Amino acid sequence: MPQHIALKDPNRESRIFSARTITAILIVTGLLGIILARYHTLQITEYETYRTQSERNRVQLQPLPPKRGLIYDRNGVLLADNRPSHLLSIVVERVPDLEQTLAELRQLVPVSDADLEAFYKKKNQRRPYEAVPLRFRLTESERAVLAVNRHRLPGVTVEAQLVRHYPHGELFSHAIGYVGRINERETFELDASDYRGTFHIGKVGVEKYYEDLLHGEVGYQNVETNAHGRVLRVLERFDPKPGADLVLHLDIGLQRVAFDALGDQRGAVVAMDPATGGVLALVSTPGYDSNLFVNGISSADYSALRDSPDVPLFNRAVQGQYPPGSTIKPMMAMAGLKSGLVTPEYTVPDPGWYSLPGDSRRYRDWILKIRGTGHAPRVDMEMAIAESCDVYFYDLARRMTIDGMYEYLHPFGLGERSGIDTTNERRGVLPSTRWKRDAMNQPWYPGETISAGIGQGYMLATPVQLAVATTALATRGTHYSPRLVRSINGEVVSAPELTPVQGSEEHWSAVQNAMREVVHGRRGSARKIAAGIQYEMAGKTGTAQVIGIAQGEIYREEEVAERHRNHGLFIAFAPLEAPTIAVAVIVENGGGSSAAYPIARQVIDAWLLDEELPVEDAGPVEVN
């Protein structure tokens, strides 16, 4: 019989079905478990994280930059202002293709290579979703072009902001300084939270010295945005705290007089109030337009300033170190009187030259080339100051020694920074045996003391140091660290008092009367400016050599290149009995003090006699 083959095996099929069903159930259960676990992670474990990320797409925290404090002169004239300007920025996270967007923007508005370079640097230093500036000071037509094309430029914003403006340009460039864009080094040094939304910082001068006060405190606001990043509403706002307003001791009228008096000459004028230490005028010429630096100076403009032989970026008032020349003679006279080496009646013979004992070298007096002899057979202290007799002070310096000079001149503020509230002040040089040993590893020689006795040789001083020393001469020993800022948000700032210069009333009277003779005496070295003067002025002329003159040779100015000619200096205070102004003037390569003392006369005349000093019109406000 044929064998029957079963076509179906119900038991086997049942087992296979059961196995497949169980496998499917396990797979589905596993997948459901994974989904549930993921739901648990999203909704419970990491809920706050993802909620925050979701909120960031809808709500943003935006910085509100503070308004920078204003700067005024003593009369309330605005010297540093904030003006509205429009800024082109990019929120990188909202831009699909950054390079394409930049290329399109460069076709719409001018964007320089320098702008692009600054943009990429800032891009790498900012926080996520923080706008990166690309162009400052957009014109009205540029804003219109960007507005028309806004629909195809996601992430591109045009915002209004306040930008620093200096209405008087060059007039206060060295006194106030300027702000500029925050650079890469400053980005790492600054507290990022304090400067969010701010692109400028004080670079030099008052703007930098008082940066912490002028800057203010940043504010914030939470805003709701749509998918394109546009603000729909403000949810929460914390207003910024504006920077402090500063009122300076500077007087714009006196500043203008000093600036015009210097004219095209290289030099500096510092005028101070002896009673307070307030700086009434601080001028260094040539200057520059501070507005050039605010939003980034062009390469051409910066090269012109940097490469100019007149170095307009150099603040001669606080950075210029010059031999003070004969301007230190009143201070030397006080040192001699206090040390007991001389009296007002003490005299020295003056043949027109001086030699150290046992040395044949002759140290000439300036008068020798004019008269062929000295000032007089014998010279006392008053004549020595009034006519600027070198021989008298050669002799005094030799007997005092260089270390004695250091001891007595240091209290006048020489050889030390004055502490003026600005940047980059230099300390000058008040030499001593120790100074030369430390600086040059060399001994001090007696002949160097002779040169130092008339403010030459190694001795150097800045115009602001000479102004401070002049206030000590004016007040009979009391002087202050010079101050540009008079008040902060209406609160008066007092200048720190420096260590007084000690001296008897008799000695101070003798020196002040001798300085009076410089201007009002029949043979005073500045008698030319006394014509028509309506007050009594005390002063002292000074001439500083730029190049050395060999023994036996005569300095002939007409044969010397202009930049090798002598500097002219003058210090003065007035009125004599109750001084309200002290002035120090330096004219580089002016040929001598005759280039400096007419400037001082103009400045003091303006302060004492003019009922209303001129105020420069700042011109119309230009809004960009």
Image: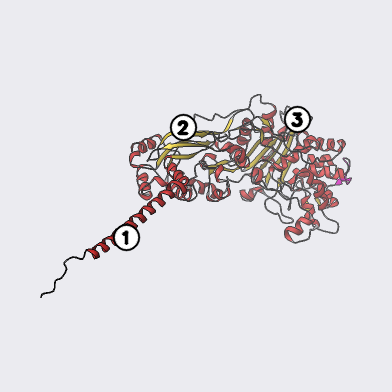
Question: Which numbered circle lies on residue 623?
Answer: 2
Q: Position of residue 342 (x, y in %)?
A: 88, 44
Question: 10 Å neighbourhood of mark 1: few (<14), some, or many (≥20)?
Answer: few
Q: Position of residue 542 (x, y in %)?
A: 72, 43
Q: How is the image coloured?
A: secondary structure
Which quadrant is home to the N terminus?
Answer: bottom left
CB-based contact (under 8 Å), mark 3 and mark 2: no
Q: Which residue carries the number 1 mark?
A: 23
- Residue kind at label 2, given as amino acid type: Val
* Eye-nearest disc, 3 or 2: 2
Element under label 3?
A: loop
Element under label 1?
A: helix
Q: Earlier in the sequence, mark 2 or mark 1?
A: 1
- Residue kind at label 1, given as amino acid type: Thr
Q: Earlier in the sequence, mark 3 or mark 1?
A: 1
Q: Is residue 522 visible?
A: no
* Eye-nearest disc, 3 or 1: 1
Q: Position of residue 310 (x, y in %)?
A: 58, 47
* Eye-nearest disc, 2 or 1: 1
Q: Is residue 532 visible?
A: yes
Q: Which residue carries the number 3 mark?
A: 575
| Front in this rendered view, residue 363 or 609 | 609
Magenta residues (range): 339-349
- Chief SS of the magenta region: loop
Residue at mark 2 to residue at mark 1: CA–CA distance: 77 Å
| Front in this rendered view, residue 284 or 176 | 176
